[in-house]
Image: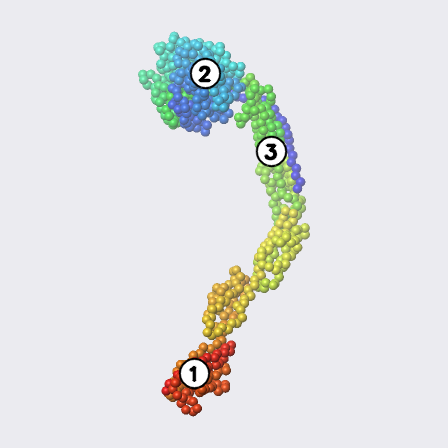
Amino acid sequence: MIKTTTALSVFILFFCIRLSAQYYNQLPQFLRVNGIWVFGSGTGVSFSTGRPVSMNTAFSGLEGCAAVSSPVTGDLLFYSNSRMCWDRNHTPMPGSNGLKGNISTTQGVCAVPVADTPGRYYLFTLGPEGDSLHYSMVDMSLNGGLGDIVPGRKNILLDIGLLSESMIAVPGENCDVWLLVHAFDRSELRAYRITRSGLDPNPVVSATGYLPGRWGNRQGSMKVSPDRMMLAVSCSKSLVSGANGIILYRFNPGTGQASAPMKIERQSVYDICFSPDNSKLYGCGYESFVASVYQYNVSVYDSATITNSRTYIRSARNEGTSFRLYRDSIYVTSSGLGFLDRINRPNLPGNACNYQLSAVALTTYTSYNLPNDVVYPYPPDTLFVKTLDTMICEAMPPVTLTALPGFSAYEWENGDTGRIRTITERGVYYVISKDDCRPRIDSFVIGGADITFSLGNDTLICAAPYPVTFSVPLPGAAYTWQDGSVDSFYTATDEGEYWVVAELAGCRSADTIRLRFTDLSQDIGPDTAFCDRGAAWELHAHVPPRSVVLWQDGSTAGTLAVTTSGRYWVTVSEEYCASSDTADIRFISLQQDLGQDTIICMETQIQLNLEANVPPGAMVLWDNSTDDPVRRVSDSGAYWVVVSDYGCTGADTIRVSLEFCDCVFTAPSAFSPNGDGRNDTFRPVIQPGCPVSGYQLQVYNRWGHLVYQTPPGAAHSDGWDGMYRGLPAEVGTYMYVLEFEAGTRGQRHRHKGDVTLIR
């Protein structure tokens, strides 16, 4: 196999563009850092899944609240009610107790990240109406990574003047953030600038008008439009006649100045909120003990036009109604209720804004207000550099991407904050390098594709010649085969050399394969049984040239002689090809031996066990049609068995005979030779049919004289008829001696006894 891989081209392209403006509250960093809200009585809302989900917290407060999440992951970091802070585990930060804020101040707490110092936050707190402004420093690296107040940076006095209850942070134009507060006793807006160098204690002051005298701006809130060009301040329950309502300003995020104030509402208004496209303003008016949500069209900056555009949306739950914009919706809360309403289409006029009641169910009850926004410095025009760094045409190795040195902070598209990053996949990667809030975005393009492939081993096809298909698993690639065909596959039917060139994503790769066919298929025969154990069988393997043979016993010849039963296999291989076959060979011995023919004495009970030779799996048949390996015999006769297996049979027959090995006899104790034909002769009674020889009977009287003796050659049926010397013998007792040889074995008998002759 011959393989080549090349890159068609490698090029580097630089270009710079200026990013179009985007509202700060739609930037991913803003959405992540504000993705969890904490407020009310131990409740909160998480947007981590894209939709609001209620959650339990340790929060306790009436109005002012702030919650900070990670700008990288969106995970909760800490939250505060202006009097103390809780960490992500809902545990109080050890050094946070005693912050100089007031839980009944509308926007009494505001968190602002420290520029270019990840993990550090200014925490601004407002005292009760008529009190001053302080700030503390939160460092998330303290308390084991759970965060705490920096020692010596707690409750630092920033403004000792009398301030109202409204406070927000607004991104500036020069890598800065403006902290905006409003005077309590006069028409004056104060903007404190926060930069990379720190917090400027000297505010930019703007005269705002319409709030005459002490107690003019008593309660209310402040909101900025998403484009940061308008500022709205609401006033509720003022002690000065005519001071309630909404004041609208033009705002300059570059200088922190508010200008062109105009009053667009005169009834008491607790909170306000701009629509995502800056064209609408929402507020909750409260007059004659009735609270209502209104919409104002602020697309034309004219007092009369805006005032006349006021549109009733619906009645409010109560006067303590608060608004907060997140993504493209405005969420609405009313004090003491267990849910959030939502304005789903706030850019649309009137009822088309789609005010949805009870859109989000909460675990507990709400307070008067929703958390203040956490904002970052708004990035100015960004230098965007796109670079196609390299072309990789093989398996993707780890590649190290390095941002330019000299910047104070870095952030990659996946949230990494280091200057160097290792990647293992192709794609476009970018890093934001920050320096004096002039970000530079470098994009690294890792191009090419892994087009390494193989047509397979190029020496052998492990079968007889047949069509062989090669395929290249590179979807979208262009192909050129040796004969000019362009499919992703090629079918070969002959031995020879084949090659293909593949091109994909600017990369080219080629491979060549040489084909040779070999047929190693094996057939050493079927499973076989032999009826003679002494037979022999030979197995033959198919052995092409250059192939190697291996039998199960380790032998390597082309044939194998088999003399015993067993399973036999052979494998024939050539390079990486191999073929095997297996045969079961059985040598079956069914020879039967029931024993020699048997003769059993007549007087002996026959008890024979005839046992057949039955290998496992064989079938048995006896002469009586039974199939047990053992047959019990209790009578004379001829017995046979047949055993069969795999077409082989074995048989045997045994004959069991009875004979008179000995004779059983008795002798009468008396006889009466009176000629009546019954018991007239004294002779022994011998078992019928039993052969007898050498029979002799002698009878003696009481004086010992021989009175009778059988003649030589007499049969055992001969006996004494009671005559002596031609005359009837006297009645009385006689002694006899009986002798004979009995049975087939010539058993000698001699018996003495007495017999009584009766007349």
Q: Secondary structure at mark 3?
A: loop
Q: Is the residue 535 above or below the residue 571 in the image?
A: below
The N terminus: image quadrant: top right
Q: Is residue 332 left or right of residue 577?
A: left
Rendered position, 56 above or below 694: above
Residue holding disc 3: 396
Circle 2 is placed at which residue position? Answer: 124
Q: Secondary structure at mark 1?
A: strand
Quote the CA–CA distance across marks 3 and 2: 50 Å
Q: Which kind of residue does numbered mark 1 sit on? A: Met
Task: Kindly identify the residue that appears in the image at 49 percent across and 73 percent down.
Answer: 600
Q: Position of residue 136 (x, y in %)?
A: 47, 16
Q: Residues within 10 Å of mark 3 (few under 14, many from 20)?
A: some
- Image x and y of residue 506, in percent: 62, 33
Furthest residue toward top: 213
Q: Earlier in the sequence, mark 1 or mark 2?
A: 2
The mark lying in front, picked from 1 and 3, is 1
Q: Which residue is mark 1?
A: 735
Callout 2: SS: strand
Place residue 276 in its image quadrant: top left
- Kindly report which numbered mark, 1 or 2, lies closer to the viewer in this rendering: 1
Q: Residues within 10 Å of mark 2 (few under 14, many from 20)?
A: many
Pointers 3 and 2 in contact (CB under 8 A)?
A: no
Quarter of the figure with the C terminus:
bottom left
Q: Is residue 460 above or below residue 293?
A: below
